[in-house]
Image: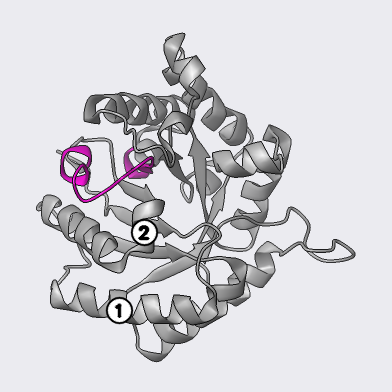
């Protein structure tokens, strides 16, 4: 019997939209979802704004009782104190965040965040009662060497090796091949499936069947309404972490509609 996992479409706005633009986007996006008659039993929707816009998103979601989750794009590993510019997991939880992106390739590259820091971020998010979306994925060079599956699985294992089953059950993984982020190139549906299955199989070996079967694995990397249908049909792909396309309300709503319609078993 196939396991039913509710897909998640999460829009990662990155460093875009001030709080006024975020307000306009959420209002427009909510209307588009309403017009599309989205069945939220078949697809969860989340927005990941910048820190300065989270409160604006929270106010709209709560005031209008919108069926939209939201979260943050990164988090500090410290809880409070003299850490200029940091935002703690408890602060994000107090704003009603459900998710926090951890380990995105842009954070790894530009800040940089290493494996130890990413593990600490995951633990901070879990301790605050939220769910981390752990981003993993290979570079083009690693793909050319044929080690892309081992690399992605290794990144997951670096984080999960010290987690309890309860902690692992709250984790989401986003497979985002680095060469596909913001390039217009996208992994083939079979490549996305191969990576997602390899990750799930490794979780199964470590934490057992129930944790693996319930784990939601997203695909990210130049996702659009033109390629979403074939990608979401893969049995181990449970939604998307959408970058550039999430800046356009109509396009993101179209992706949500595609995912919701594909999940006919829910």
Residue neighbourhood size for the residue with mark 2, other residues' Cα within 10 Å, grouped as few (<14), some (14–19), many (≥20): many
Is residue 220 in the magenta section?
Answer: yes
**Is 36 displayed left or right of 241 in the figure?**
left
Pinpoint residue 51: horizontal percent, then vertical percent: 61, 68
At 15% across and 52% down in the image, what residue appears?
263
Res 150 visible: no
- Outermost residue to the front: 183
Location of the C terminus (image quadrant): bottom left
**Is 254 displayed left or right of 185 in the figure?**
left
Pinpoint residue 129: horizontal percent, then vertical percent: 57, 63
Tag shown at residue 162: none
Residue 256 sits above or below residue 25 on the image: above
- Outermost residue to the right: 82
At 71% across and 64% down in the image, what residue appears?
88
**Element under disc 2:** helix
At 43% across and 25% down in the image, what residue appears?
202
Q: Quadrant of residue 212?
A: top left
**Is 44 displayed left or right of 129 in the figure?**
left
Pinpoint residue 152: horizontal percent, then vertical percent: 48, 26
Range covered by the magenta-colored residues: 213-231
Res 38 visible: yes
Residue that numbered label 1 is attached to: 28
Q: Which of marks 2 and 1 is nearer the N terminus?
A: 1
The residues bearing labels 2 and 1 have C-alpha atoms spaced at a distance of 13 Å
At 36% across and 59% down in the image, what residue appears?
246
Residue that numbered label 2 is attached to: 246
**Element under disc 1:** helix
Location of the N terminus (image quadrant): top left
Is residue 226 in the magenta section?
Answer: yes
């Amino acid at each position: 019997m196939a396991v039913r996992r509710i897909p998640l479409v999460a829009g990662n706005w990155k460093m875009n939209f001030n709080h006024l633009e975020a307000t306009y986007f959420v209002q427009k996006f909510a209307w588009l979802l309403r017009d599309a008659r989205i069945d939220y039993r078949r697809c969860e929707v989340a927005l990941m704004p910048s820190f300065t816009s989270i409160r604006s998103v929270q106010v709209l979601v709560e005031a209008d009782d919108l069926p939209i989750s939201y979260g943050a794009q990164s988090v500090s590993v410290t809880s409070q104190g003299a850490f200029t510019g940091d935002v703690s997991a408890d602060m994000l939880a107090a704003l009603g965040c459900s998710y926090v992106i951890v380990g995105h390739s842009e954070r790894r590259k530009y800040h940089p965040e290493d494996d130890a820091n990413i593990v600490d971020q995951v633990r901070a998010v879990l301790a605050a009662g939220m769910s981390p979306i752990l981003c993993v994925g290979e570079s083009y060079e690693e793909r050319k060497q044929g080690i892309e599956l081992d690399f992605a699985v290794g990144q997951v294992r670096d984080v999960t090796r010290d987690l309890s089953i309860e902690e692992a059950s709250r984790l989401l993984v986003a497979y985002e091949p680095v060469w596909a982020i913001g390039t217009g190139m996208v992994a083939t549906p079979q490549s996305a499936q191969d990576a997602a299955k390899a990750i799930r199989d490794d979780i199964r070996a470590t934490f057992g069947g129930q944790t693996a079967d319930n784990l939601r694995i997203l695909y990210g990397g130049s996702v659009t309404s033109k390629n979403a249908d074939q990608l979401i049909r893969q049995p181990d792909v449970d939604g998307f972490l959408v970058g550039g396309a999430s800046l356009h309300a109509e396009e993101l709503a179209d992706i949500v509609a595609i995912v919701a319609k594909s999940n006919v078993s829910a």
